[in-house]
Image (spheres, rainbow, N blue to C red):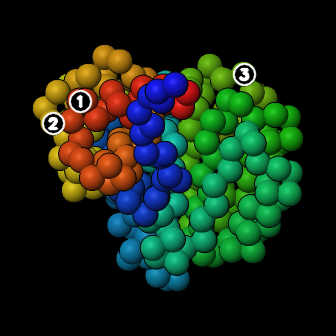
Amino acid sequence: MTKSKVFPRQTTLDLGHAPEVRLSTFIPTGNENLISALESLGKTWETTTPTSSAPRFDQRLIHAWGPSGSGRTHILQAMVAKANDLNISASSLNHSSTPDEWRAASLELENSTEKIALLCVDDVDHLDEFGQGALFRIHNLIKDSRLQVLITTSSLPPASLRLRDDLRTRLAWGLVFQMHTLSDAEKLNALEKAASARGLNLSSDVAPWLLRHFHRDMPSLMALLEALDVYSLETKRAVTLPLVKEMLAPKNET
């Protein structure tokens, strides 16, 4: 029996090849005000001293809402990375976080009321009763601090969230931004920009084909781009449409 061609096995992806998750790698189209606010916050961190004037409480609360694929998780990861660069305490939680992780984040805030600290909470609309209670208490801690920052995200605006009333109200106390997804043209630009950041040359027909035949959300497209980078290196071939189709084709070994 003749065996069909066996393509090189995809290895574990080398995340060191992936562009860093930064505000600079986020396509801001439609979200310029949000990105401007986050960049201003980062610049404030760079110049703040123990004797600096504390920003108003409502300036230290940022809530971003929008559909899946709009980049909510990206901006949170980017802000945590910025804080880490400056040796600022930063934590990230979501609906999957354990009670112990919530307690640890709360304790960290309690112990650093006079220092800059960042807490990011993704997908607050999926928090269970414990998470909602913990986030409510954290809001109060940050309100009583001088420099602590809370950035939260959801798929709907605060007023429409099915959360406990006191938490839903608090999520609207600060700056609230609606996040917008990218158009097809903007997605093509984002893919080409990410490929360029990797030093990867895509043939002109690759990105449009991916939009027509693959998942259209940016996280999935970026993950595929990463896989293409690895596969291109394994096969020592340029990223052309035949290579893309080859990588995505079922691999039969009989």
Mark yes or no: residue 230 visible.
Answer: yes
Q: Amino acid at mark 2?
A: Ser
Label 2: how many Cα within 10 Å (few below 14, some 14–19, many 20+) = few
Residue at label 3? 162
Front-lying residue, 192 or 53: 192
Front-lying residue, 41 or 54: 41
Query: Image point 86% across, 41% down: which residue?
Result: 130
Is mark 2 in CB contact (under 8 Å) with mark 1? Answer: yes
Label 1: how many Cα within 10 Å (few below 14, some 14–19, many 20+) = some
Residue at label 1? 241
Rendered image: mark on residue 203:
2
Q: Amino acid at mark 3?
A: Arg
Q: Secondary structure at mark 2?
A: loop
Left or right? Give the position of 99 relative to 37: right
Left or right? Give the position of 154 relative to 189: right
Q: Amino acid at mark 1?
A: Leu
Q: Position of residue 242 (x, y in %)?
A: 25, 30
Query: Image point 51% across, 71% down: which residue?
Result: 84
- Where the C terminus falls, by quadrant? top right
On screen, residue 70 above or below 173: above
Q: Earlier in the sequence, mark 3 or mark 2?
A: 3
Front-lying residue, 212 or 93: 212
Q: Secondary structure at mark 3?
A: loop
Front-lying residue, 185 or 83: 185
Label 3: how many Cα within 10 Å (few below 14, some 14–19, many 20+) = few
Query: Image point 37% across, 26% down: which residue?
Result: 181
Furthest residue in direction left, as rendered: 204
Q: Position of residue 99 (x, y in %)?
A: 86, 51
On screen, residue 148 above or below 238: below
Q: Secondary structure at mark 1?
A: helix
Mark toward the viewer: 1 or 3 = 1
Furthest residue in direction front, as rendered: 1
